[in-house]
Image (spheres, rainbow, N blue to C red):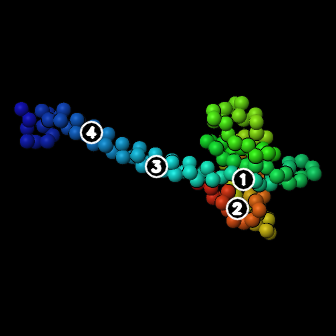
Amino acid sequence: ADSPDVDAGSNAFLNRNMQTTRCNDFIDDLLEDKSQQILQKAKTLKRLQGWLERKQHSPPYSWLTRYVMVREKYLLWCDRQLTVGQNGIDKKEKKRWNKCIQIMKINKIENDKTDKKERRFIIGILKGKEYVFRAKDKKERDHWVNGMKD
């Protein structure tokens, strides 16, 4: 028979069952909250696309106009405006773009402090390479920097 003492041995099954139910409810609530946060982030990332200029790494160090986009877990750019295909970003899709960088490999995104017009920002990746981008104005630059940092 069940004992009035909650910690009694005869109540062990009920205690485990109640704790499991509470844990499951807690985990369900936590997953729901995280799912909502992820959906919000995805909506923000979808807005990160547009034309930027990227500085060449070698002479003549010109600024090249590139269509830049953040999709799924990648930063992509190309010399023409593209959309991501129905299959998402697979091996074939990556080849269509001039450059495709995994967001997880980005270790730095910051404003270029030497830029007096406040339009440039720097993206650094784990291998030590840096890419310098230039937006049309400070507001657009901040949109990219803050969007990528989030």
Considering only order in the chain, which callout, 1 or 4, is on the residue closer to the N terminus? Answer: 4
Would you say the residues marked 4 and 2 are in contact, meaning their CB atoms lie under 8 Å apart? no
The mark found on residue 50 in the picture is 1
Q: Secondary structure at mark 3?
A: helix
Q: Which residue is mark 4?
A: 21
Would you say the residues marked 2 and 1 are in contact, meaning their CB atoms lie under 8 Å apart? yes
Considering only order in the chain, which callout, 2 or 4, is on the residue closer to the N terminus? Answer: 4
* Amino acid at dot 1: Gly
Considering only order in the chain, which callout, 3 or 4, is on the residue closer to the N terminus? Answer: 4
Crowding at mark 1 (Cα within 10 Å: few <14, some 14-19, many 20+): some
Q: Which residue is mark 3?
A: 36
Q: CA distance from mark 2 to mark 1?
A: 10 Å
Q: Is residue 149 left or right of residue 114?
A: left
Viewer-proximal residue among 18 and 36:
36
- Residue at the image position 64 percent from the left and 44 percent from the top: 71
Q: Secondary structure at mark 2?
A: helix
* Amino acid at dot 3: Gln
Would you say the residues marked 4 and 3 are in contact, meaning their CB atoms lie under 8 Å apart? no
Q: Which residue is mark 2?
A: 140
Q: Position of residue 76 (x, y in %)?
A: 72, 44
